[in-house]
Image (cartoon, rainbow, N blue to C red):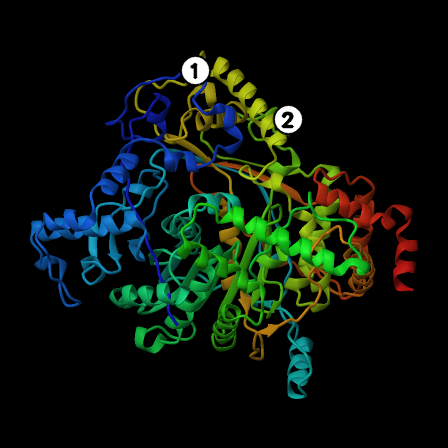
Amino acid sequence: MEGHVVMEEEVQPKQQTSWFQWWNRNDTNNNNQTETSVPEGIEDSSNITNENAKNSGGWYAGLVSTVAALPIPTLRGKMPMVNVNDSTRYSQLDIAQIEFLETEAKDVILQHSHSWCWFEELTDLDKDLQSWTERPGVASVYDTGSGRCPLPLPKYPMDTHPGYHVYIKNSLLLPQETPSEIYHTQPLRTKIATAFKDYYNFPNGKHLYLKESRNNLKIEKKTVIISVVGWLPEKYEKLTLGEQRTAQYFSKKLAQSLKHESPSEILSLSFECPLDSKELNEVFEECQLLLRHWEHIFKDAQAIYFIGVYHSVPLIILLAKYILSRHEELKFDKDTYVGMLAIESCFQGYRFWDHSIDSSQTSEADDVTAENDYSKMQKNKEKILFQGLHKNEQDILSKIKNYNDLDSSESKLLQAELDWLVHNWDSFRLSMVGKLYDNFMSVTQKLAIDYFHPKIIRNIWVDGQYFDLDSKKPEELHLPDYIMKTPRFEYDLTIPDRRIFEISLIDNFLLTQNLGRKEFVSILKLISPFFISRSYNPNTVTSSIKKQRTAATKLWFQQMEAKWNTMEPTFEGNFSFNELPESISTVHNFLEYTQYLTVKSPELFQTYSEIYDDDIIFKNFIENTLLTKRPLTKKHLVILRDNLNPTSILNTVNQYDLVWKFHESLCNFIKIKNIPIQDYPKCLHFTIALDSILWKTIYNDPKRFQRNTKEAKNRLRQLLDAYQTWDPPTKGLVHLKNVLSVLSSYDDIRLLIEDIQN
């Protein structure tokens, strides 16, 4: 088995307003400039993302064009060749040799041709925003001298956003934000019953339990972070994930959350890999070779965390198996905590959904026609996705969908490696998280619903913007307009009544998966495609909606420009992060001004609010790893062979299956005992922060769990009530409402329970 990785560099730009003097106290580059006109491209503001910052002019664009114009052999030919091997030390090199290695490494990073990693010590990572891009580290680039002699650099050699940023979170994590919400400690009677069942080979230990105490769970020794990001062609990335972050970004976000555990040392290896142009096994081999120079960092590690996104998740599975299987050689023991965070995973491939062209006329009588229409649509969609790509890129990226076939070689490899991890490493935990509202993959695909094991914990991230809760218009959110001395604010927003049903539906059925109930896999597969919509990605939205959003954004920007041209924040004297100018010291003004700057000057300022930026995800991941107790008996990974794989949400047969599966699932649900009592309705957590949110510890409450079916029936009542006010906005969810219209005929929960039990 093999694999691979890659990355690049940036410079602090000149600031545009005096307000940035507060944002970062380094004033040396400040240069007061103001723009009063609507920025170019505002007509296409629905597509304003962090990509603007990546693609904006400046040093990076100039460097890329310069390097592209200078063939690498010619550039290298002007410099003395440096012969290095694995025994070469950096201290042995002279200035000319070091310059050659730096140029060689940066050339390869710019080309995205080979894997590379960035080592960084993150123990003292602070809140200073400049420290995120100006910290020193060590680069190792495959097939260069630095791959054999790691190269110290003053800062990260890959393009990241060089300006300022603020985190504005408006989201919710289902079905829990900490394992303490849904798990409890294991009673003695359960331990005895589990041992008895295991002895007689009966099914047992469906889910995890909490450890008896949180005491002594602090990671006081070394923690190692391995983050991996695979490259994607720009258009492909926009049409699928929308955007990614760098591997270094994930390492630092996790390190911020880990500081709560007070480890004595946090070391990180951030891999960037050409997974868009090389086979997984080839990239894996490159990563193995790069790891040779960093094996010493694992010595005495008390915890190791892996992070991957989309198509890099299979690679972190291979890397984790490779590292853990050599734990004696790397000098860490089998008690080491090992956590893996898979964001928007490609574990179960993808397929294309387009509800606008799905045919509602398909039935058993014309299966052949339906299958032909489905295959034709898949080919057309894939053609659009791969448009403009090289043949090699198309061949490599097309294999991602093969994970959808559990008998494919790609899937078989993952199954074998993951089985080794869950069976052989007691403290291993896999946390999978994905977006609920998506234009590409369904919930069950990105959460690999057919992979069953107690050590797999699944979560869904809900973005509040799709409830028409726009943080650019704080007065419409009914946020209190508090005075803020510092940019830190937290508030719970109510989910609109018209959307509570869809959240409760997915929340309840996803909870069953974390409780180890296989019988609910089918219903999740059937309902998850209804949450797919082109409107959930600004790069795939229909032209009519795009036009509406552009007009609304343009009007909002003009209003903000008129306001802030006369209220530009100014500073007098020496200010720190602890004091905001009066003009932006209220919640509403701060939100308006920061998002106005994001639109006006995206190369200098960004607001971050995506799934990759949510600290709750990282907190939940850490607690899943540290707070849960290993199962009493070792278990192998189970692959579920569920045959319900709908090709269209409008297919008559699929609708029939859904109605009966829904009935069956409700019948099974109200029989579940010990379902945890949670807040209802759940709230969106709205926060403003410069770095990370406040860590709120939630302790296990035994009163949450009752050994009866009372809470299950209570949740069904809540679901029935929520259906009556459900008013979804997208074609898929509207159709789901129609399919489940039988619920509208019940006004009494007792009648519904009576019917489903009979």
- Where is residue 347? Give x, y as percent: 53, 62
Amino acid type, residue under disc 1 in the picture: Ser
- Where is residue 750? Give x, y as percent: 91, 54
- Relative to 209, is 55 on the left or the right? left
Q: Is residue 287 above or below residue 544?
A: below
- Relative to 125, is 321 on the left or the right? right
Nearer the camera: disc 1 or disc 2:
1
Q: Secondary structure at mark 2?
A: helix
State the count of labels.
2
Residue at the farthest bottom position: 200
**Which of 175 and 125 lies nearest the eye of the viewer?**
175
**Which of 316 and 373 lies nearest the eye of the viewer?**
373
The mark nearer the N terminus, 1 or 2, is: 1
Badge 1 density bin: few <14, some 14–19, many ≥20, Cα 10 Å: few
- Where is residue 551? Give x, y as percent: 58, 22
- Relative to 111, is 190 on the left or the right? right
Q: Which residue is mark 1?
A: 37
Q: Quadrant of residue 222?
A: bottom left
Q: Which residue is mark 2?
A: 476
Q: Is residue 574 above or below residue 230?
A: above
Amino acid type, residue under disc 2 in the picture: Glu
Assign the N terminus to one quadrant of the image.
bottom left
- Picture residue at 16% right of the left edge, 53% below the top: 101
Badge 2 density bin: few <14, some 14–19, many ≥20, Cα 10 Å: few
Residue at the farthest top position: 566
Marks 1 and 2 sit apart, C-alpha to C-alpha, by 26 Å
- Picture residue at 9% right of the left edge, 49% below the top: 79
**Which of 686 and 150 lies nearest the eye of the viewer?**
150
Q: Quadrant of residue 448?
A: bottom right
Q: Secondary structure at mark 1?
A: loop
- Where is residue 357? Give x, y as percent: 69, 45
